[in-house]
Image (cartoon, rainbow, N blue to C red):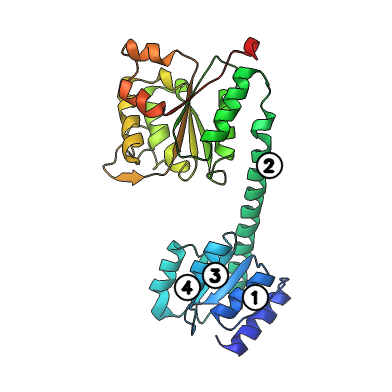
Amino acid sequence: DEPRMTQVLGILAERWGYEVRTACDGNEALKTLHEFPAEIIVSDMKMPGLDGESLLGQVRARYPNTAIIMMTAYATVKSAVESMRNGAFDYIMKPFENEELRLTIERAAEYSRLKADNAFMRRELGVRYNVDNIIGDSEPMAAVLAMIERVAPTRATVLVTGESGTGKELVAKAIHFRSTRATGPYVRVNCAALAETLLESELFGHEKGAFTGAMRTHRGKFEEADGGTIFLDEIAETSNNFQTKLLRVLQEGVITRVGSNTNITVDVRVVAATNRDIQQRVREGHFRDDLFFRLNVVPVHLPPLPER
């Protein structure tokens, strides 16, 4: 909100190779952004009218890929830290050295490039795993594709069944990339490839020292998939003990790392798959019926290849 300071910073940023627009308050900044969708914003915290925190909220809502650097005096460092929790890229304390600001802007520029690359990659994956790319126009496959279209936009848990090689993961990816979670992570876990203790650690994470060889804290796949989709392949091969813990995740939306008593809330959509007759596994007592009920919200059965 200081015109001279704003002008000086604009000149500096142009010398560093950036195209720059300046504004002396939050409302003027929003008008400027409408015509000039900037990758990076450097904003004061304290401004008349629309202050830095309010500007941050509006920019995050309208321009989610824009990196925001907050400038703050020592007395408002606590507010700056809070702004980072609310989505700011970083903050810089006044008075500051020009080199400090330049390096912070460079990091923000790299962050913006990575976000843009990531968004492009996800768009490409969305095209690649479009239902139109799933081969098969027989009546059974038409029913599968129609089900994918219906279930993808929902939050429903999906159980995909079918013989090996029929494309169960292709269905899982099509569901993810056609859902509202398409910009979030897609994480795959082969449940049959890991022993029970390793599977629990892989999915839920573990704390340092939780067991021999746990040299550091490890984030599990459910934490990695937060905001996105986790694909649990070969789910029918898991033990009853593990199934009990997975059931809790589906019921309560929380995980507990191995060696910890702290619950971690996760927002993850689950798509599970198996090539076994899972209902037969339930009847034999090898698979929990309550977990089957939770997973089988929307069943998708892939027909064998000869039927396509």
- The quarter of the picture where residue 140 lies is top right
Disc on res. 124: 2
Side (left or right) of 153 relative to 265: right
From this view, report whether residue 6 is shown above or below residue 296.
below
Q: Earlier in the sequence, mark 1 or mark 2?
A: 1
State which tag comes first along the sequence, 3 or 1: 1
- Is disc 4 placed on a helix, strand or loop? helix
Q: Are marks 2 and 3 in contact (CB under 8 Å)?
A: no
Q: Residue 262 lies in what quarter of the image? A: top left
- Label disc, if present, on residue 69 of the rendered structure: 3
Q: Earlier in the sequence, mark 2 or mark 3?
A: 3
Is residue 170 among the parts visible in the rendering?
no
Name the N-terminal-most of marks 1 and 4: 1
Q: Horizontal placement of 301 versus 235: left or right?
A: right
Q: CA distance from mark 2 to mark 3?
A: 30 Å
The quarter in which the C terminus is drawn is top right
What residue does disc 4 label?
A: 54
| SS at badge 3 | strand
Structural distance between the alpha carbons of marks 4 and 2: 34 Å
- Separation of disc 1 and disc 2 at Cα? 31 Å
Q: Amino acid at mark 2?
A: Glu
Q: Can you give x and y, in whole percent of width and height, for residue 120 in the image?
A: 67, 48
Q: Secondary structure at mark 1?
A: helix
- Residue at image position (63%, 44%) is 122
